[in-house]
Image: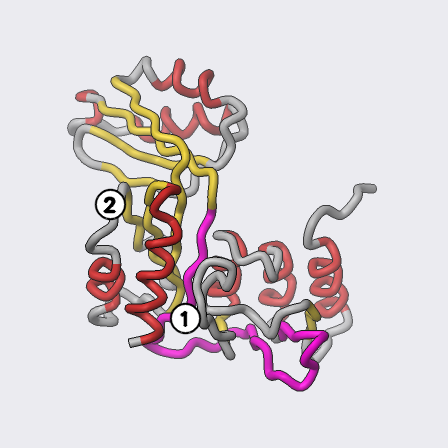
Amino acid sequence: MDNLQRGGSDYTASLIGAAIKAEEIQIWTDIDGMHNNDPRIVEKTSPVSHLHFDEAAELAYFGAKILHPTCILPAKLANIPVRLLNTMQPTAFGTMISNKTEKGKLKAVAAKDAITVIRIKSGRMLLAYGFLRKVFEIFESYQTPIDMIATSEVGVSLTIDNNKHLQDIIDELKKFGTVNVDTDMVIICVVGDLEWENLGFESLVVSALKDIPVRMISYGGSNYNISLLVKSTDKHRAMQALSHHLFNE
């Protein structure tokens, strides 16, 4: 037996809906669906009418507070749509989450705070196999998940959102090479239909942030998300710029 944490009621609704094979699972909140950006930071955001299960999961994981990430999986496995509705505006359409994708469309932006980036630079990576496994085993031993990762022939950069064992991790990573750490970073994710054959979405995202330093870019692990790492001091400017270039032009 365990106590359900934040999002427990959403998760329970999804589990029950899947168990009884409901036609639709409804989550009632105080906002009319998942918005295309954070309304606390960006003016004139608008609700997203339709999201794929994976798009909603990405947004929930990377900071969209309206929905807990665990809520999506039971509904997805049972292929039952989830609708986000507003108790203050019960006639509003809200957001429908299902297995359908709107082809070629960028949907929303979300941000995850308190990120630390670690870079390991080592000549041992050159033409070596097993190096990344050894690095990952260190994070596994301290039960510290990795969010983003980028590699080159002589280095690897990765991000974490839990600094509880940061110094221990750094000490062990120093066995492999030089370690540099930057804290107070933010992961900003852009979510939509990002199949690699769709032309132009990368240039839209990058051009929106042309005046903002970007520490890392991650794409390819998912067809629904491109993630960018920026300083926390640049978070608001980055989210506003993305909203302007992606949704308002």
Rendering quarter of residue 93: bottom right
Frontmost of labels 2 and 1 is: 2
Colour theme:
secondary structure
Looking at numbered disc 1 in the image, what kind of residue is underneath it? Lys
User: Quick one: label 2 or label 1, which is nearer the N terminus?
Assistant: 1
Task: Say left or right for 16 vs 139.
Answer: right
Name the image quarter holding the C terminus: bottom left
Estimate how packed mark 1 is, as few (under 14), some (14 to 19) or many (20 or more) residues with alpha carbons within 10 Å: many
Q: Is residue 148 visible?
A: yes
Magenta highlight range: 83-112
* Relative to 2, residue 99 above or below: below
| Residue that extends furthest to the right in the rendered view of this protein | 1
- The front one of 207 and 26 is 207
Q: Is residue 163 above or below residue 224?
A: above
Q: Distance between the residues labelled 2 and 1?
A: 23 Å
Residue to which mark 1 is pinned: 107
Image coordinates for residue 145, horizontal then vertical, percent: 49, 36
Q: Quick one: label 2, few (<14), some, or many (20+) residues within 10 Å?
A: few
The stretch drawn in magenta includes residue 97 = yes
Query: Is 188 part of what is drawn in magenta?
Result: no
Front residue of this view, candidates 116 and 192: 116
Apparent side of residue 180 relative to residue 167 in the rendered image (left or right)? left
- For the N terminus, the quadrant is top right
- Give percent across and percent down for residue 16: 76, 65
Name the side, left or right, on which 16 lies relative to 198: right
- Residue appearing at x 36%, y 19% in the figure: 173
